[in-house]
Image (tube, rainbow, N blue to C red):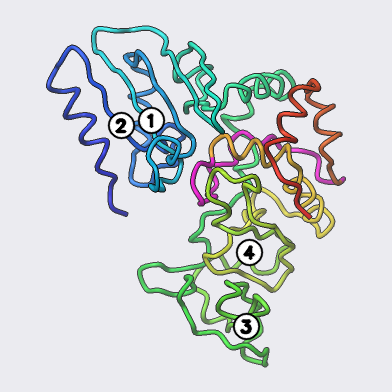
Amino acid sequence: MAGAIYPIFVDLAINVKPNYVSLITPSRWMTKTGRGVSDTWVNEKINCNHFITLHDFTVATDCFDNVEIKGGVNYFLYSDKYNDMCDYTMHQNGIAVSQRNYLNSYGLGIVVRDSMAMNILNKIIAIEGQYYTTNNFADLVGPNTLFCDCAKGILNTSWDGYVETRDEEHNIKYYLNKNRVKCGYAWIKPSDMIKSYDVVNIHKVYIPEAGGSGTDANVLGTPFYGEPGSICSQTYICIGYDTKKHNFSKIECENIISYIKTKFFRYLVSIKKKTQHAFAQVYQFVPLQDFSKPWTDEELYSKYNLDMFEREYIESLINPMD
């Protein structure tokens, strides 16, 4: 993966040692969802406390007409001589909301760009403890290379070694993009697989790897049940993939799907998901639940003591999912 170039320019400007640095960059780095930007670089920036002000536009066209930059853009004022909280302003839907805080508030490891999110996360932390460091929903989410060999082009999004009708030889169900096969699945041979053999025969959940723009009200693509005897292409990500950690039943998978479809779940994902991609790390702020039962928004709002304003805020931002 090629590295992003803008961190290099930021560092070059800082290393010149001017009194101030002011630049415009994509905002993806703040939530560690910028491809080609190292976590080490992000940690250094959000922990340095040298940012005096930062204006963050969640939709880039609010700052630059006719320019699409996934995850938005920001401009900042930085000084090595400054060491304090940042005056952070989020611009969203024509509304500017300002707060004064450290960029790495509460040691979450990212900039929480939504000021309301911090209140909601605090209420979850009051119940779950520091769940965002370990033992959260991200632990259930597999890599998007779970089955494929990218170097050899096997079982990736463009691989075409499948057949559309099951036969004695091709007996593993292979979920792939519906643009390739209208019904959304085909069939492959066991010998086509090169790894993750133990995942084939377990119950799991598949969800699109790419869903939404990063700022839309759906947040994620629609999840579905992955039956034993199936795998997926890179179009999807597998939830419940690690047989050493979890071995879900079909009912538990269906209950996981009910949880994903809640607005509460997808709002928490949206805190980190600022591009179309939904890799495991965007699920960091989603707490785990008891999957012996299905979940609704009302149950989750009550469990975490969200007040009416916080509930209405989530309801206004996130679309329902059938």
Residue positioned 54% across, 37% down in the render: 272
Q: Where is mark 4, residue-wise? A: 199
Question: Disc 3 designates what residue?
Answer: 187
Residue under the image location 55 percent in, 50 percent down? 278
From mark 3 to mark 4, how far is it between C-alphas? 16 Å
Observer-nearest residue: 212 or 202?
212
Q: Is residue 276 magenta?
A: yes
- Name the residue at 50% across, 85% down: 161
Pointer 3 with pointer 2, Cβ within 8 A: no
Give the residues drawn in magenta, as a range: 273-293
**Callout 4 amino acid:** Val
Write down the residue under mark 1.
74
**149 on left or right of 247:** left
Tag 1 and tag 2, C-beta contact below 8 Å = yes
The dominant secondary structure in magenta is loop
Q: Residues within 10 Å of mark 4 (few under 14, many from 20)?
A: many
**In the drawing, does residue 202 fall left or right of residue 293?**
left
Position of 19 relative to 215 (above/below): above
**Mark 2 lies on residue:** 24
The reply to whether the C-beta atoms of the residues labelled 3 and 4 are less than 8 Å apart is no
